[in-house]
Every structure is written in C-alpha cells, then in structure tokens.
C-alpha cells in the first residue's frame, strides 16, 4: 500500500519524444505520464502527424514498446486510411472557406498573397521568393482567420451576453478550438479552409463554453441556438478535418 501511494503522488516524468516507424512512415511519438492514468492509451494526431501514448507513472520504455507492438495492426490500418500530406506548392488547389483555389506563383513582385479569378476557377496568387510560398499562404490564412473569427466571436458573445477574455490562433493538431475556464478562446487558423457554416459552428461551439463548460444537453442546446447547422457542420468536420490537418505548409 505505501508503494501504491508513492506511485500516485510522485511528479510525472517529462514527456519523451522520439521517432517511430509505422505503415511506411516515420512519425514523431510522444510518451507522456499522467498521474490519473490507470492504463496505457494510444492516440493518432490529426492528419497522422504524430502518435501520443499516455501512461501511468513508472511505466517502462520496454512496456510502452510492447504496447505499441500489440497495436501495430490497428495503427497500420488507421494510418493507411489517412490522406497523404500534400505539400503547398504552385499548381495544387487548397480550399478557402470551402472553395478550392489553385495556387499560382508570381515571382516578379513583392511577397503578398491575393485572391484572383482564373479561367479554371478561383486562384491564390502568391508573389515573392518561391521558397517562402508555403509560409506566405499560411500567414494569409492566419490573417483571414483573425478577421473573420474575431467578428464571429463578437456576434456570438453578444448573443449570449458573455465576453471572451482573449482570442488566439494556433496550428493545433489535436483540436480545432478550445475555451479556458477564464474565457480565453483559441482556434486553429486551418479552419479557414472549411466552408463558412463550419467556421461559424466552430466559433459558436467555443463561445457556448463561456456559459457551459461541458458537453451536456444545455451546452448542445445553446450551440444549436447560435449555429442551427451544428449537427451537419460537426459531422462535416469529423469527416473532413483530417484532410485539412494533413496539408503541409512547411518549406520544401
């Protein structure tokens, strides 16, 4: 009994991060202790960007390796279903508010991004050095996210009579948005690639947490009042979110 008490109260060790080979990929593996965990759990990050294993304190590396070996088939099956990570580059199409835009590079002028119309549909025209094209498109999506999402936050917080402490933007892999207990709202700027109703739903979802910090019946009732398309948009994000997370904005 004293030994069991010691295991529950010791400070968790720092997370271990290493590469792991599975299904023809090399992905980062994060192993993290959790004092409340009673068993090992395995999670695939959105878009297959990495793996996470949560373990109770004191679990050995060998035990983690055996756990991964037992779940090798499950991992291979799930990762095989994920889309390849398309690299942002000239000629490919990426969605903006759900509408595919073809990327065009114009190197002769300063490094900006603008929307244009081509003979085959909408374009994202990127100026400047070719090496910086992925980052410039990511920065463009961040600016669009700030402009649109801050306006939606104002709309939905006004509807429920609550205020957000701050609105932040990140490139998260585990969730599309979050709301802290003190009212800080965070969003993945990648949501700007989703259709407008899905963007609105995500903002409504996080704003609803300012009143209901749970996912109970009252929360979902409020969420549907703010965004009537909640159920359809929630299903869309579950079905298509992985593909948006898989798009790589890293430099080639």
Image (cartoon, rainbow, N blue to C red):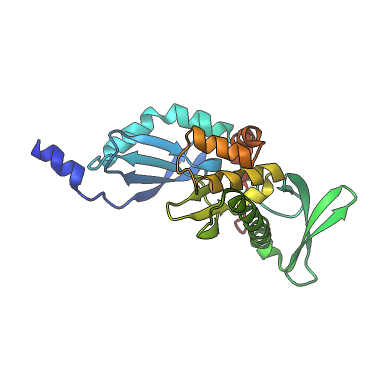
Q: Nearer the viewer, residue 28 or 22?
A: 28
Outermost residue to the front = 161
**What is the x, y in percent for residue 90?**
75, 55
Residue at 90 percent of width and 50 percent of height: 119
**Observer-nearest residue: 178 or 69?**
178
Residue at the far bottom: name it.
110
Residue sitting farthest toward the right: 119
Q: Is residue 74 left or right of residue 196?
A: left
Query: Is the C terminus in the top left, top right, bottom left or bottom right quadrant?
Result: bottom right
Res. 89 image quadrant:
bottom right
The answer to whether residue 45 shows anywhere in this view is: yes
Of 171 and 126, the residue lying toward us: 171
In this rendering, is residue 150 above or below 22? below
Residue placed at 60% from the left, 45% from the top? 204
Give percent across and percent down for residue 129: 71, 68
Q: Is residue 41 above or below residue 114?
A: above
Residue 135 in the image: state x and y as whole percent: 64, 61
User: Residue 131, relative to residue 42: is it above or below?
Assistant: below
Q: Going 69% across and 42% down the picture, which residue do you hit?
A: 197
- Residue 248 seen anywhere in this rendered image of the structure: no
Residue 80 vertical placement versus 163 (above, below):
above
Residue 138 in the image: state x and y as whole percent: 64, 58
Task: Tell me if 223 is positioned left or right of 31 in this view.
Answer: right
Q: Residue at x 73, y 44 (%)?
A: 98
């Amino acid at each position: 009994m004293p030994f069991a008490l010691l295991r529950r109260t010791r400070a968790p060790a720092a997370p271990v991060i290493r590469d792991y080979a599975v299904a023809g990929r090399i992905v980062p593996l994060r192993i993290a202790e959790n004092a409340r965990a009673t068993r090992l759990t395995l999670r695939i990050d959105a878009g297959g960007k990495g793996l996470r294993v949560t373990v109770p304190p004191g679990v050995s590396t060998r035990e983690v390796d055996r756990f991964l070996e037992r779940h090798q088939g499950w991992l291979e099956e799930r990762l095989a279903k994920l889309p390849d990570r398309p690299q942002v580059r000239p000629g490919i199409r990426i969605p903006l508010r759900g509408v595919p835009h073809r990327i065009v590079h114009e190197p002769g002028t300063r490094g900006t991004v603008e929307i244009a119309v081509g003979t085959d549909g909408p374009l994202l025209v990127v100026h400047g050095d070719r090496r910086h094209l992925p980052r410039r498109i990511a920065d463009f999506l961040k600016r669009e996210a700030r402009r649109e999402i801050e306006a939606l936050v104002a709309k939905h917080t006004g509807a429920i009579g609550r205020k957000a402490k701050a609105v932040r933007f990140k490139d998260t892999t585990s969730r599309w948005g979050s709301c802290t207990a003190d009212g800080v709202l965070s969003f993945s700027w990648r949501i700007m690639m989703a259709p407008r109703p899905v963007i609105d739903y995500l903002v409504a979802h996080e704003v609803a947490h300012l009143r209901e910090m749970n996912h109970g019946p009252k929360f979902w009732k409020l969420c549907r009042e703010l965004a009537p398309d909640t159920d359809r948009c929630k299903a869309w994000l579950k079905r298509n979110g992985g593909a948006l997370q898989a798009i790589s904005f890293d430099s080639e």
